[in-house]
Amino acid sequence: MSEKLSGNEAIKKKSHLLRGNIAEELADSNAFVSDESYELLKFHGSYQGYDRDTATARKKQGLDKSWEFMLRLKMPGGRLTAQQYLALDGFCDTHANGTLRITTRQTFQFHCIVKAHLKPFIADINRVLLSTLGGCGDVVRNVITCPAPIRDNIHAVLEDACFTFAREFAPKTEAYWDIWLDGEKMENYPFLPSPSSGEPLYGDAYMPRKFKIAIGQPEDNCMDVLCNDLAFLALFNGQELQGYNVAIGGGLGMNHNNPKTYPYLAKPIAFIKPADMLKAGEAVVKLQRDHGDRSDRKHARLKYVVAEKGLGWCKTVLKGHFGATLYEPLPVNAWAIVDHVGWHEQGDGKWFLGVPIPSGRIGDSIHGVNYRSALREVISQYKMPLVLTLDQNIILSDIEEGERTPIAALLRRHGVRLREDMTDLARNFIACVALPTCGKALAEAERVQHPLENTLQQLLDKHGISNEKISVRIAGCPNGCPRPYVGDIGIVGRTPEHYAIYIGGDFEGTRLNEKVFDKVPFENIGTALEPMLVFYKANRQAEEGFGNFCYRYGIEAIKKNAVEALSANHKWAA
Ligand code: SRM
Ligand code: SF4
């Protein structure tokens, strides 16, 4: 580790707890902010970007980029009320591009906000008791957990743990209220602590990098718990919580062609008793706060500490902070994912409905479907509590038996496909935002989900495997936002209109997949996958998923077979 700190460390340290020059720059006449404020704004929930669709044409005309901001809420466990949703629905017209975007970490993003609207937008969000503080930046990000509104002790425990962490690890700086609300402080904030004049846990340099926490259970790994820096795996005996297996060091970001960066799944390090959960969480945050690499942001996540220093070393440091016994992790035999989309009983006589939203984009006239109007109408009428899922969908809860038919009819009237109207492939398809708003995108993702899904579905139909449960995740770049490295099939942007293809992860999210092809043109993705799917159909065992089959058979063997089957005309298959 070099001694020289990265530029971001100096920016954080001299910012007076995230204040910097943000207030002054919000008031000036520029359409953009400085590099320093760009970094600090992330902690407040916003990224500055520009419209990548128009950038080249504007440059040719001698015009500046069309600057815009993204805003991300922090919404622990994805929970919100009908009133909050309806307020956000209105704000996306007033301040953004007329859409709400559900993220892969259970919250909302808004896009295309001009600078003058940032402050009123954030103030509006706070006035409905939601927040953007810590949505991005080097802090504990949105804490995630199972979204299923099942009214039993298991789900109450998971939700309670999620809210506890969200409250404890929220940044405490007063700068947020001063900048966005002119010092006004909201009463009855559900998840935020009272602001204070210091940051007792983080200190003035905050964390070395983003830090992600998930609370899950092996019986339902719907949040890909092992992709987080800190994963709590709740272990129950019936409804009774026994304690948590703690796993550390998950993270997916990497760079193509830089083997020093890699995706990594969190490694189990200890079992702890229920009462020690918060103390254990704090110990892991302190481990990363003190030992994460602050000299190189590409090497700053906890995964590199775990991979390079080893679990034994990490455990010794944790013990120093923890002070109590860290037991050996308990064995976990079977992992599963429960589908929360569709109709489900809550356990209290009521129902919940998981509504599928392709790529999480809630707008109107999207491939002929009015998602936004549908949700606004149903939520206005029934006022049900809502939960966002980890795969970009939304759950309507507390539905009475007699309300089921009219609710389904209302949604279908706007063209919304319910679970029973869609294939397993469509159900298990995730795409990240990518172009035109994401500054990191090398290729399209969200905007090509629809045609790609159609191509792949036609392939499955052609080969008589239409009903296979195969997860497909497409990302515009290797950062891993739609978690492409833990699905059956990962498709990762490489250069404009070209993708790397990964296979051999498992549907349950416990194993990383591996790259088989590089720089495949978008129109050839189906061609590349076809021989593998044909081989799968011919050689799989009963009930064997595509990723598990590839892993059992050997990724190299699957690739070799595919290369032989493909025409020599395909350079990428050579
Ligand atoms: Fe992400 C950066 C979108 C979940 C790994 N991610 C970005 C940025 C902010 C681009 C940037 O840095 O300029 C993207 C904003 C695009 C836009 O226009 O809106 C972005 N990430 C997203 C979302 C919206 C994807 C989605 O389609 O839903 C997800 C928002 C999560 C949230 O609500 O907090 C999102 N990002 C993830 C996940 C998945 C997860 O956390 O479960 C990962 C992989 C896990 C991990 O953290 O390693 C992820 N995002 C990254 C990385 C790679 C980090 C690394 O360690 O290398 C970056 C780049 C970075 O941080 O430098 C990144
Ligand atoms: Fe952007 Fe890459 Fe994340 Fe997709 S995976 S949202 S392209 S950073």
Image (spheres, rainbow, N blue to C red):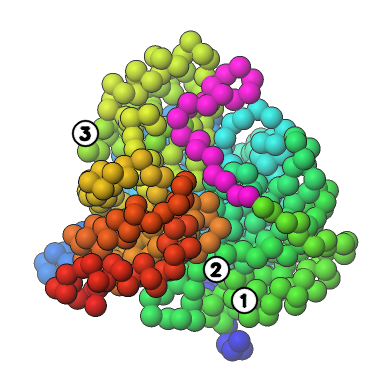
Residue 142 in the magenta stretch? The answer is no
CB-based contact (under 8 Å), mark 2 and mark 1: yes
**Magenta region, residue range:** 334-353
Residue 547 shows in this picture = yes
Q: Position of residue 544 (x, y in %)?
A: 46, 50
Instruction: Find disc 1 in the rendering and name its residue.
Output: 307
Q: Quadrant of ligand 1?
A: bottom left
Question: Looking at the picture, which amino acid does disc 1 mark?
Answer: Ala
Query: Ligand 1 within 8 A of label 1's CB?
Result: no
Gap between marks 2 and 1 measured at Cα: 9 Å
The C terminus lies in which quarter of the figure? bottom left
Kindly report which numbered mark, 1 or 3, lies closer to the viewer in this rendering.
Answer: 1
In terms of secondary structure, what is the magenta stretch mainly? loop
Q: Position of residue 534 (x, y in %)?
A: 29, 56
Residue 338 in the magenta stretch? The answer is yes
Q: Is 351 in front, or is 37?
A: 351
Precedes in sequence: disc 1 or disc 3: 1
Instruction: Find disc 2 in the rendering and name its residue.
Output: 264
Q: Quadrant of residue 392?
A: top left
Precedes in sequence: disc 3 or disc 2: 2
Q: Quadrant of residue 302?
A: bottom right
